[in-house]
Image (cartoon, helix red, strand yellow):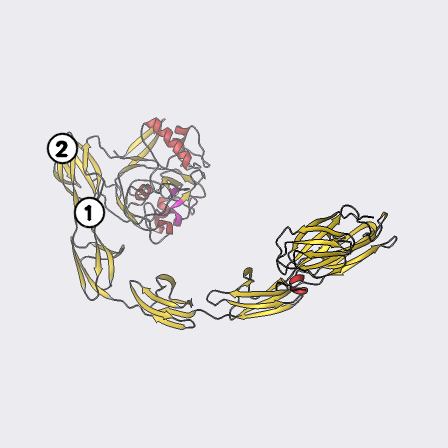
C-alpha cells in the first residue's frame, strides 16, 4: 500500500535562552564553526535529515524530540523517511546563527500509514497534573503548548510526551501513559541555568556596575541575581577613579563573589583662607573660609578674596597628590582726601555713609569706589574714584545748589516772597536752590501761597500763581453732616525705621506735596449720609465707621465725589506717615524741611501715649468717639489707635533711594493699613509700623480718613 505523507511545519523559531548548542552540548561543524541545533518535535520515528550539500552532524532522538546539529551556513534541509523516501524539502525562514538553538514542530493533517504508534482512545479521559519548582513554567504536551504550571486537565487516554521550560532554567521532558482509573501527577524541580554575583569595590563603594557593556542600574556593594550561566564581562566605574573590568565564568546555580580595587585618578586638596575670605578654584566660588575635596590632575588657579584684596596661587596637580595650603590675602591701602564747597557735605562711599567734609581718610583699601557728596538744597555730587597703593587721592567738589526757574502770577506785578523773604515782583526768573520752598504773592490786600519742590532732575521749573490759591482748613458738608479737613504743608522726612520691623527698612528720604487730610477718621454719621446704611459693629454717629473693606471705601469715595464734585481719595502711605508723625506741624509760613518723626502720633514718650491714642490697654475692647483724645502737631486726631486706617497703596518693599510723592507698589495682593486700633498694642501702633490686609477683608478694627490734593 502506497504511503502518502502530508507533513507540515507548524512553527520554526529561535529559542533565545537555550544554551544547549553553546554551553551544555556544543558540536563543531566541518566549516570549523559551532553548529546550530534544531530541535524537531514529532511523535514519529524513522526520519533521515540532510542539510544543503553538508553532511549533518550525527543526530539523536530523546523523548519525542530530534536533536539535529547543522552548519551555520545552511539555508535549508531535507526530511527523508526510511520507508517513504523524500517527505519534505524545507527552506529556513530565518538566518541560521552558530551556537544557536531553534525549534521546529512538525504535524500531519492526514495519517501516514505504518507510522502510528498507538490507537486513539477518545471515549475515556483521565486527569494529568503537572507542577514545577519554580512555578509559572511553560507546559507542552505532545509538543503543543498547553499553559503554565501548575497545570491540571482531563485528557483522552493514551501516551503523552510532556516538556516543561522556563527562562534561565534547563528544560525537562518525559513521557506519561494515561490509563483508565489511574490519574498521573508529575512534580518536576527545574535546574537553574543561572547564578548570582556579589560585586564589591574598594577603596570606595557606590561604583556603577555594568555587565557585558550594559548598565545594571546598581552600585557597589550589591547582588546581581539571575545572571545567565557562561562568560560575562563585569565592569565598575566611579568619578575620580579608573574604570575596572573583569571576565567571569558563571556556572549554573553558582554564587560567586567578585571584588574590584579601583585606582584613584585624583589629587586630595585642602585650602584655608586667613583671614576668612571666599575661596575660588579656576574662577568658580567654592566656599568661605575653607574647602576640602578631590580634583582631577591638571593646572589649577586657587584664589582667596577678603574684602577688596585677594591672593592667587597656581598649582599643577598630579594623580595621587595631597595638597594643603593656606591662602593669606593681604590688604593694600592708600589715602583719600575730600573737601567740598559748601563744607559739611555728607560723604557716602559705595552707598555707605562714612563722614562729612572736609576729611582725610587713611588706609583705604586699594580699588575702585563710588563717591557721593550731598548737602540739603544742593545737587548731589558723584564720581568714580580709584585708590592706589601708597598714594593719596584728592577730591575737591563744588556742589551746585539750584536750578533756573520762572515764577508768574495772575495778575502780574504781585509782590513775591520765597520762604518768607521778599525777592521782587512777578514775573520772576532766577536760580532757586533745590528742595522745598513756599512761594507767596501779595497784591491789593490779597494773598496766596504755594509749596513747590525744586528737583535736581525733572520736575517743574515754571510756576504760575493766582489769588484763588488759599491753603487753610475747611469743612465739607454732606447732607447736613460736617467733615473738617486740615491743611498739611508738604515737605521731606525720613520714612520708615532701621531699628524695628524688617518691613520698615530701609530708612529713606521722601518728599510729599501739600494736601488736605481729614481732621478725624470718617464717622458713622458721614458714611450713613453718603451710603444710606451703616456696616459698623460698634454703633454710634460720632464713632469711626469700621467693618469696611478697602473696596467698600472706594465705593464710598466714588459716591462722595459725585455729591461734592471734588476728588477725595485715600492717603498714600507716605502722606499718612508724614501727617501722623510730624513734630513741626502746620507752620504755614515756614519752608518744609527734612525732620525726625514722633514714635506715635503726637508723642515719642511711652508715658504720654494714653493722652493721644485708644489702644489695647485703655480702650475697653471697643471704639470711641473721634477727637476724644489730643491731636498731633497738624491738628489731627486718632492717627494712632481707635481704628486702623486704609491707605491707597499696594503693599511692597521700600526702596533705598529718595523719592517724591511715592504711591507704593504697582500691583500686589495686599493693601496697606496704618496706625493701630483699639485692639492693638503700642508696639504695632507706631507711626512707622506697616500692616498689610487683603482689600476685600472687613473687621471692626479697620476704618479710614480722607485726603484731598491742595490746589
> Residue visible at 79% across and 57% down?
175
Q: Residue at x 43, y 72 (%)?
A: 320
The span from disc 1 to disc 2 (Cα, nearest Å) is: 26 Å
**Disc number lying in front (1 or 2):** 1
Give the labeled residue for mark 2. Answer: 414
Q: Secondary structure at mark 1?
A: loop
Q: Is residue 682 magenta?
A: yes
Q: Nearer the viewer, residue 173 or 667?
A: 173
Residue, x 30% and y 40% (percent of image)? 635
Residue 493: x and y, percent?
27, 46
Q: Earlier in the sequence, mark 1 or mark 2?
A: 1
State left or right for residue 337 relative to residue 697.
Answer: left
Write down the region rendered in magenta: 669-691
Does residue 76 show up magenta in the picture? no
Q: Is residue 490 above or below residue 156?
A: above
Report which residue position mark 1 lands on.
377
Give percent across and percent down for residue 157.
Answer: 84, 51
Image coordinates of residue 315 in percent, x first then y, are 35, 70
Amino acid at each position: 500500500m502506497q504511503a502518502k505523507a502530508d507533513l507540515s511545519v507548524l512553527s520554526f523559531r529561535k529559542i533565545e535562552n537555550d544554551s544547549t548548542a553553546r554551553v551544555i552540548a556544543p558540536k563543531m561543524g566541518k566549516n570549523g564553526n559551532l553548529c546550530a541545533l534544531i530541535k524537531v518535535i514529532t511523535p514519529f520515528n524513522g526520519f533521515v535529515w540532510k542539510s544543503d550539500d553538508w553532511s549533518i552532524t550525527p543526530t539523536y532522538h530523546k523523548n519525542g524530540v530530534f536533536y539535529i546539529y547543522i552548519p551555520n551556513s545552511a539555508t535549508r534541509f531535507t526530511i527523508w523517511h526510511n520507508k517513504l523516501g523524500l517527505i519534505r524539502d524545507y527552506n529556513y525562514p530565518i538566518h541560521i546563527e552558530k551556537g544557536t538553538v531553534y525549534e521546529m514542530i512538525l504535524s500531519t493533517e492526514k495519517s501516514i500509514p505504518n507510522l502510528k504508534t498507538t490507537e486513539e482512545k477518545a471515549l475515556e479521559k483521565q486527569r494529568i497534573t503537572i507542577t514545577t519548582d519554580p512555578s509559572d513554567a511553560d507546559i507542552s504536551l505532545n509538543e503543543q503548548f498547553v499553559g503554565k504550571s501548575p497545570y491540571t486537565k482531563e485528557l483522552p487516554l493514551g501516551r503523552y510526551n510532556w516538556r516543561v521550560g522556563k527562562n534561565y532554567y534547563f528544560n525537562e521532558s518525559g513521557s506519561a501513559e494515561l490509563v483508565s482509573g489511574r490519574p498521573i501527577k508529575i512534580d518536576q524541580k527545574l535546574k537553574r541555568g543561572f547564578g548570582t554575583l556579589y560585586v564589591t569595590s574598594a577603596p570606595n563603594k557606590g561604583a556603577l556596575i555594568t555587565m557585558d557593556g550594559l548598565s545594571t542600574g546598581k552600585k557597589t556593594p550589591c547582588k546581581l541575581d539571575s545572571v545567565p550561566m557562561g562568560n560575562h564581562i563585569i565592569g565598575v566605574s566611579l568619578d575620580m577613579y579608573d574604570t575596572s573590568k573583569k571576565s567571569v565564568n558563571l556556572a549554573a546555580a553558582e554564587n560567586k563573589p567578585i571584588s574590584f580595587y579601583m585606582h584613584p585618578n585624583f589629587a586630595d586638596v585642602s585650602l584655608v583662607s586667613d583671614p576668612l575670605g571666599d575661596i575660588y578654584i579656576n574662577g568658580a566660588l567654592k566656599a568661605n573660609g575653607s574647602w576640602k575635596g578631590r580634583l582631577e590632575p591638571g593646572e589649577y588657579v586657587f584664589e582667596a578674596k577678603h574684602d577688596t584684596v585677594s591672593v592667587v596661587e597656581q598649582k599643577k596637580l598630579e594623580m595621587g597628590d595631597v595638597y594643603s595650603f593656606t591662602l593669606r590675602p593681604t590688604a593694600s591701602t592708600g589715602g583719600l582726601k575730600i573737601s567740598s564747597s559748601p563744607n559739611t557735605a555728607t560723604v557716602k562711599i559705595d552707598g555707605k555713609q562714612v563722614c562729612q567734609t572736609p576729611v582725610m581718610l587713611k588706609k583705604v583699601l586699594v580699588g575702585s569706589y563710588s563717591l557721593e557728596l550731598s548737602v540739603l538744597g544742593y545737587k548731589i555730587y558723584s564720581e568714580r574714584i580709584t585708590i592706589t597703593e601708597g598714594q593719596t587721592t584728592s577730591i575737591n567738589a563744588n556742589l551746585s545748589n539750584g536750578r533756573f526757574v520762572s515764577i508768574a502770577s495772575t495778575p502780574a506785578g504781585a509782590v513775591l516772597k520765597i520762604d518768607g523773604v521778599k525777592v521782587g515782583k512777578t514775573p520772576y526768573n532766577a536760580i532757586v536752590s533745590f528742595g522745598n520752598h513756599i512761594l507767596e504773592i501779595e497784591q491789593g490786600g490779597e494773598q496766596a501761597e504755594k509749596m513747590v519742590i525744586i528737583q535736581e532732575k525733572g520736575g517743574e521749573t515754571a510756576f504760575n500763581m493766582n489769588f484763588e490759591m488759599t491753603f487753610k482748613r475747611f469743612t465739607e458738608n454732606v447732607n447736613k453732616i460736617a467733615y473738617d479737613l486740615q491743611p498739611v504743608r508738604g515737605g521731606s522726612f525720613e520714612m520708615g525705621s532701621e531699628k524695628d520691623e524688617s518691613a520698615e527698612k530701609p530708612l529713606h528720604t521722601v518728599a510729599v506735596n501739600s494736601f488736605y487730610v481729614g481732621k478725624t477718621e470718617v464717622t458713622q454719621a458721614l458714611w450713613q449720609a453718603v451710603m444710606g446704611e451703616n456696616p459698623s459693629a460698634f454703633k454710634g454717629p460720632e464713632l469711626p465707621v469700621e467693618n469696611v473693606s478697602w473696596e467698600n471705601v472706594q465705593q464710598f469715595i466714588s459716591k462722595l465725589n459725585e455729591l461734592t464734585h471734588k476728588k477725595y481719595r485715600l492717603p498714600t502711605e507716605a502722606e499718612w506717615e508724614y501727617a501722623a508723625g510730624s513734630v513741626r506741624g502746620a507752620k504755614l509760613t515756614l519752608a518744609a524741611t527734612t525732620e525726625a518723626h514722633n514714635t506715635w502720633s503726637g508723642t515719642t514718650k511711652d508715658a504720654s501715649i494714653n493722652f493721644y491714642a485708644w489702644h489695647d490697654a485703655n480702650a475697653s475692647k471697643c471704639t470711641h468717639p473721634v477727637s476724644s483724645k489730643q491731636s498731633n502737631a497738624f491738628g489731627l486726631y486718632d492717627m494712632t489707635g481707635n481704628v486702623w486706617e486704609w491707605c491707597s497703596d499696594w503693599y511692597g518693599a521700600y526702596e533705598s533711594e529718595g523719592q517724591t510723592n511715592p504711591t507704593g507698589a504697582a500691583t500686589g495682593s495686599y493693601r496697606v493699613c496704618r496706625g493701630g486700633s483699639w485692639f492693638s498694642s503700642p508696639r504695632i501702633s507706631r507711626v512707622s509700623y506697616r500692616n498689610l490686609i487683603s482689600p476685600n477683608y472687613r473687621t471692626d478694627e479697620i476704618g479710614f480718613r480722607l485726603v484731598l490734593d491742595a490746589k
